[in-house]
Amino acid sequence: MGDALWLAALLPVLALFLLVLLGRLKTVWSAATALAIAVVLAVWLFESPLDTLATGVAKGLWLGLWILCVIVPALLLYRLASAAGMDRLGETFAHYLPRPADRVLLLAWIFPSFVQGVAGFGTPIAVCAPLLLLVGYDKVRAVVLPLVGYHWSVTFGSMGSSFYMASLTAGFGVTAQDALATRTAALLAVNAVLAGGLVLLIDGGLARLRQGAPLLLTAGPAMAGTLIVGATAVPAVASLAAGTAGLLVLVSKRIIEARQRIDNDAAASSADPAGSENSENPPHRPSQAFSAGRSAIILAPYGYLLLLVLPIFLIPPSRQFVTGTLELAPAFGQTMTGRGWVNEPVDAYLPIPLLGHPGSYIVLACALGWLTYRYTGRWRGTDNRAVIRDWLTAVRGSAPTTLLLGALAMVLVDSGMVTTLATGIADVAGASYPVVAPAVGAVGSFMTGSSTSSNALFAALQAEVAGLVDVRPELLVAAQAAGSNVGNSIAPVVVLIGAAAVGAVDSVGRIIRRCLLPMFVLLLAVVGGVLVQLT
């Protein structure tokens, strides 16, 4: 019966994966179908009473609401910027980053990883997918590229929340936590460079890879090395520091190229006196200056978002204050199943800190951006009702799916199906379990849409299995964390955030299909890293 149970627990996961992947149904109906299968199995095989199911659904709806608090203001941010003319900024990006490879690496690899450092839960995709859209990418690729490019920064992003969850759940002390940080960072550092290469290949094949090689081979090692050093020193800022290193490399590269161009122009002028006379008063390019100023105004809400988030979350006392003050959180009592699975009571489940939630800062950025548009005249002539109508239409398209996916995730958790599935995989794998440990983490984040939740579910299991197969527990928990990063990037909830931000809610299946091969490559890289660390 044990084998039947873990195979049964696989059915809702497989159903959601195939339904979304094949795209036969809209994502909302795929989620509803998978939820119905999960409810039937929970009652029939896992002996979950109605109060357990009701509590699981309630937790899931709250999880969905938490995510919607990111999606809804992110959609408004995009609508405001679009109404102010964001769709016309492609030429400005092309001017300051003339190489397409540099543009895609910035917007799909470096910048989303930087944003992930302080604001996770899909925020980097919600911010960067619209920026890729405005430089000419179609809606599907605008979401696919940052999903592939940023995944490596998740564990040490959001001020290290996912990493600390893994360490605490596994019961690690200071020494073991330090070892976990080093091992996890080593696995993800390889994927950081690999992700940049995959972004280039997805964008334009080998030709784009060759074009982007100079930035990839300088920013990649810089971000990877910074991630390892940062994780060893202060895990909470490792991803932020790595993303910053990438930005600094890009800026330095552009400065060097600008100086070389000036030197080349000067040399050409010296060789051509007539050209030198003409170059004494080079033609003024007011359109470019205006374009730069206009671009700064139009992108003001995104700038405000960073200016608001960075100083507050980088300073520990202010971070602790905003994340622990004015919290909204429901309480749930203990529930259990007929098979003995117990869900402990929770006094404050998944709190929404009004001062510390990413959505709060996106709302404030929207308000400041709108005031900036009004003050500078960018909002003149805009149809306010049309903006609000488009925004609410996008919200209605994404909200039901988000809530259903949240309910599905928590029904699977509270019925014991998720842990049953992971335990069954461990039993079947036996001594070869270290090879499949990353896949367990990926399954957890695929279902819950959160690397943090995956680590909360499976880190203790990974540490326990490590003792049975005679492997250091820090290695299997590191494999869990790194694998959850990969699964996070094809999680329907996370994909939905990016799809909603660009108005492509019905393209979730297409986006996941486009992500599958690169994510498989990245998961294999994690498995290879685990095997290397085993020796």
Image (cartoon, grey):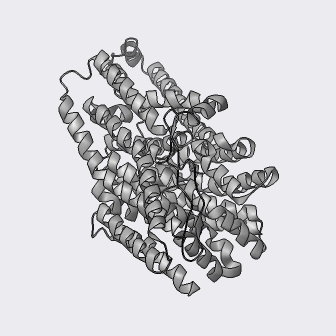
Q: Is residue 360 above or below residue 227?
A: above
Seen from the viewer's position, the closer of residues 525 and 174 is 174
Question: Farthest residue in the right direction?
Answer: 175
Residue depicted at 59% across the width and 36% down the height: 324
| Residue 234 x %, y % | 71, 41
Which quarter of the rendered picture does the N terminus lie within? bottom right
Q: Position of residue 403 (x, y in %)?
A: 37, 55
Q: Nearer the viewer, residue 343 or 120?
A: 343
Spot occupied by residue 448 in the image (x, y as percentages of width and height):
49, 60
Is residue 190 among what the camera can see? yes
298 horizontally vs 154: left or right:
left
> Is 528 on the left-hand or right-hand side of 24?
right
Quarter the C terminus occupies: bottom right
Across and down, in percent, residue 273 comes to: 42, 16
In the picture as drawn, the residue positioned furthest to the bottom comes out as 1
Q: Quadrant of residue 484?
A: bottom right
